[in-house]
Amino acid sequence: MYKKILMAFDGTIEGRSALMECAEIASFVHAQTHLLAVANMPSTMFLTEGFVPEELIETEKKRMQGVLDDGIVILKDRGFVSIPHLVVGEPVEEIGRAAKDLACDLIVVGHKRESRWAARWWKGSVSASLVDRVSCSLLIVITK
């Protein structure tokens, strides 16, 4: 079954739900787990300024390090150990790259279903974008 699982964690309610499901699956199949947080810069910043100032990148990295640390603590409090990873970049690309580099069998992500059609159309979905970009199984944990 699954030997290595990558959990993409962003600290949201949806991410926390996915974190709990990931822990359940990993403990059931005795899989090694990797917890990934992605420090991401809004594309609008790059498009308007032409670059992302280093201090904004560092601020986002610190914020996401806190998110990653919280995820590790949540898992540790439940008696579970996970290997932390913090990367900077576009989430879909970085999640796919990490899964490939770590030779993961499963990626777990959280997702909140948007009820308004315009929100679904305008806002890109990491989980939906991953489907066509990864070569391993993908579990999308839906939160309503």
Image (tube, rainbow, N blue to C red):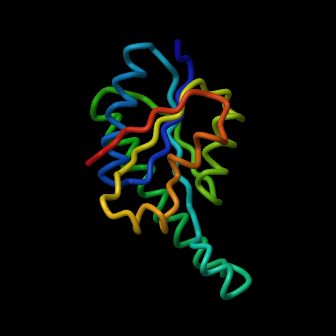
Q: Position of residue 2 (x, y in %)?
A: 53, 17
Q: Position of residue 99 (x, y in %)?
A: 64, 35
Is 9 on the left or on the right of 51, as rendered? left
Q: Residue at x 26, y 48 (%)?
A: 144
Q: Residue at x 29, y 52 (%)?
A: 13
Q: Residue at x 65, y 37 (%)?
A: 134
Name the quadrant containing residue 20: top left
How many numbered discs, if any? Answer: 0
Depth order, front residue of 142/41: 142
Q: Is residue 17 above or below residue 10?
A: above
Q: Position of residue 85 (x, y in %)?
A: 57, 45
Q: Is residue 116 above or below residue 30?
A: below
Q: Is residue 87 above or below residue 103?
A: below
Is 59 on the left or on the right of 113, as rendered? right
Q: Residue furthest front?
A: 117
Is 140 on the left or on the right of 131, as rendered? left
Q: Position of residue 34 (x, y in %)?
A: 53, 34
Q: Residue at x 49, y 19 (%)?
A: 31
Depth order, front residue of 94/67: 94
Q: Residue furthest bottom?
A: 49
